[in-house]
Image (cartoon, coloured by chain):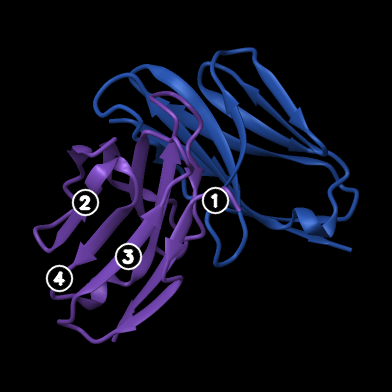
């Protein structure tokens, strides 16, 4: 499978705990994106990387959220001190370059109880 | 502010009953308009990219068209397996590069 890979697919956590999601983009794709999607809504942009550089963060990304892409390959999205409002599907996507098609992974579902 | 509006919110068709989904957009400068299909519990699956008014693209029973203000996704003789949520998104020149702005989608149900 050469698509965008995300892990874990599902995560249930207690409020206040930290969670981390991993994304492996399509090989040789320079750009990597994180989006968040709640039921009945379209995906909302969170942040993106050009290689290892994080070039933009949405104001949706509070201080409890941090994303990294060491060495410009896989990426992690960590949420600290989770809140019930963080419950959503976290989508990772990648593209070869600016303006190219953006391909999404299957998403990581987070439920905060 | 850049905005994407999709209509209808939900559409129920009989198998073989053709129809169209609408995506209206307002952007400072359109770089591309994307259509995705999303099945329940899964990530969006890429369908088409349109770059300029008048452009059309086809894939099996789907055809996407673009004008300066809106895009249509035409579904010809749909089958039950076409049931999904169809998302429209735009990419603009202004602001952040490569930030897709999505609509809320059209939930399509095709009954046999």
Q: Chain for mark 4? A: A
Question: Which mark is on residue A79?
Answer: none
Identify the residue shown where x is 61% and y is 36%.
Answer: B22
Mark 4 or mark 1: which is in front? 4
Q: Nearer the viewer, residue A37 or A71?
A: A71
| Most distant residue in the front direction | A71
Mark 2 or mark 1: which is in front? 2
Q: Which residue is mark 1?
A: B44
Decide: is A37 above or below A13: above
Mark 2 → mark 1, Cα distance in angstroms: 23 Å
Identify the residue shown where x is 89% and y is 63%.
Answer: B112
Mark 1 → mark 3, Cα distance in angstroms: 18 Å
Quadrant assignment, res A82: bottom left
- Do tags 3 and 4 sit on the same chain? yes
Identify the residue shown where x is 34% and y is 44%.
Answer: A33
Using residue B10 as the reference point, say whether residue A101 is left or right of it: left
Q: Nearer the viewer, residue A50 or B27?
A: A50
Mark 2 or mark 4: which is in front? 2
Residue B108 visible at all: no
Mark 3 → mark 4, Cα distance in angstroms: 12 Å
The reply to whether the C-beta atoms of the residues labelled 2 and 1 are less than 8 Å apart is no
Q: Which residue is mark 4?
A: A80
């Amino acid at each position: 499978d050469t698509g965008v890979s995300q892990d874990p697919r599902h995560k249930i956590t207690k409020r206040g705990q930290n969670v981390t999601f991993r994304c492996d983009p399509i090989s040789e794709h320079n750009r990597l994106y994180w989006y968040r999607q709640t039921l009945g809504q379209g995906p909302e942009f969170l942040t993106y990387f050009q290689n290892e550089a994080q070039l933009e963060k949405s104001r949706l990304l509070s201080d409890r959220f941090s994303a990294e892409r060491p060495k410009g390959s896989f990426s992690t999205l960590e949420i600290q001190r989770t809140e019930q409002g963080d419950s959503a599907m976290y989508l990772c996507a990648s593209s070869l370059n600016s303006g190219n098609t953006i391909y999404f992974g299957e998403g990581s579902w987070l439920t905060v109880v | 502010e850049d905005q994407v509006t999709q209509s209808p919110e939900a559409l129920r068709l009989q198998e073989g009953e053709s129809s169209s989904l609408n995506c209206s957009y307002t952007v400072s400068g359109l770089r591309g308009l994307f259509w995705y299909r999303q099945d329940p519990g899964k990530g969006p699956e890429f369908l088409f990219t349109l770059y300029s008014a008048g452009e059309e693209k086809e894939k099996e029973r789907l055809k996407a068209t673009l004008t300066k203000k809106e895009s249509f996704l035409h579904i010809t003789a749909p089958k039950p397996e076409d049931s999904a949520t169809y998302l429209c998104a735009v990419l603009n020149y202004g602001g952040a590069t490569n930030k897709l702005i999505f609509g809320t989608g059209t939930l399509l149900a095709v009954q046999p």
